[in-house]
Amino acid sequence: MTRFYDHLIAAALVAIAALVLLAQSASAQGTDCSATKACPDVTNCCSQYGYCGKSSAYCGAGCQNGPCTGGTTPAPPAGGSGWSSFLTKAVFEGYFPNRVPFYTYEAFQTAAKSYPTFGTSGTLEIQKRELAAFLGNVKQESGGLQYVEEINKSNVYCDTSIPSFAQYPCAPGKKYYGRGALQLSWNYNYGACGAALKKDLLANPDQVAQDSATAYQTALWFWMTRGPHDAILKNSFSGTIRAINGGLECNQPAGSVGNNQMKNRVTYYKSLCQTLGVSPGTDLEC
Ligand SMILES: *[C@@H]1O[C@H](CO)[C@@H](O)[C@H](O)[C@H]1NC(C)=O
């Protein structure tokens, strides 16, 4: 009997000790914070393991709560339209109330498959700024996605005066006026963009105005390869304007056409930043 009770007590003690250990390890495993429980000091980040702190180990990848700097973004779906999680169809429709049916949200998503780092690079803040900057410039260039082609079609936009332009000779009778979401213009842009997209846009520039995804793809080609993407990764919205139409719009006298266009772009950009809940940064006008 005694021996039996001794064993029972010993077993109970072992069980209690095990429970205490379990309880200790459970409490050590992240009672600081969680996705739904902020850190007591709100300037701290909640790390992926549930601890509060300020360094990149807490605020970087996997950060669950607080002023996270990155890593809270869900992994982009295949095809590079991870930005669809914040630039939703509803946001897009609200931002372009006068959009013509040609320019669909879905065609924009399709076009982005060709540029998987567009809007998915850097922190979530930079990703949102990139969408706001791209669509802000699109709003200016296309009149809020109303224009598929430039209104004034009298210019040919053919320039072969330097070798890098002359490698894209103009086809007889074709004009390279603005087409698509960023109004791709000039033979040398149609030529280089067509080479990238594997479409002969020099021979048939109208393809840009006939296919919605191509109309966005040409805009994304310019954005990703001609400076705006790099500018926005450096938090420079002014750099996107400089790359797109700097010669006519930057450093122009107040009240001039160019100066007004530049200011429009900044206004459009800031408005979408506000909708997306991100600050526009400070490098805006040029
Ligand atoms: C169209 O462009 C041409 C060439 O730049 C210009 O001469 C003409 O005035 C423009 N037309 C309109 C209506 O703006």
Image (spheres, rainbow, N blue to C red):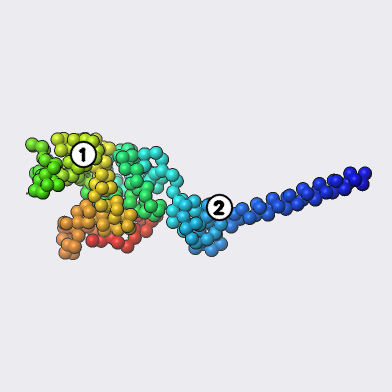
Q: Position of residue 262 (x, y in %)?
A: 22, 57
Q: Is residue 275 visible?
A: no
Q: Secondary structure at mark 2?
A: loop
Q: Residue at x 65, y 54 (%)?
A: 27
Q: Is disc 2 surrounded by few (<14), some (14 to 19) or many (20+) residues within 10 Å? A: some
Q: Position of residue 138 (x, y in %)?
A: 26, 48
Query: Is there CB contact under 8 Å for labels 1 and 2?
Result: no
Q: Is disc 1 surrounded by few (<14), some (14 to 19) or many (20+) residues within 10 Å? A: many
Q: Residue furthest right?
A: 1
Q: Whole-Å distance between the Cαs marked 1 and 2?
A: 48 Å
Q: Amino acid at mark 2?
A: Tyr
> Mark 2 or mark 1, which is nearer the start of the sequence?
2
Query: Residue under circle 1?
Result: 194
User: Which quarter of the image is occupied by the N terminus?
Assistant: top right
Q: Is 182 left or right of 69, judged from the image as shown?
A: left
Query: Residue under circle 2?
Result: 49
Q: Nearer the viewer, residue 55 or 273?
A: 55
Q: Position of residue 231 (x, y in %)?
A: 29, 55
Q: Secondary structure at mark 1?
A: helix
Q: Name the image quarter holding residue 106.
A: top left
Q: Position of residue 41 (x, y in %)?
A: 54, 63
Q: Residue at x 32, y 48 (%)?
A: 95
Q: Residue at x 24, y 40 (%)?
A: 196
Q: Amino acid at mark 1?
A: Gly
**Label 1 beta carbon less than 8 Å to ligand 1:** no
Q: Is 161 left or right of 58, judged from the image as shown?
A: left
Q: Residue at x 18, y 44 (%)?
A: 189
Q: Is 75 left or right of 244, judged from the image as shown?
A: right
Q: Which mark is residue 113?
A: none
Q: Is residue 171 visible?
A: yes
User: Which quarter of the image is occupied by the C terminus?
Assistant: bottom left
Q: Residue furthest front?
A: 163
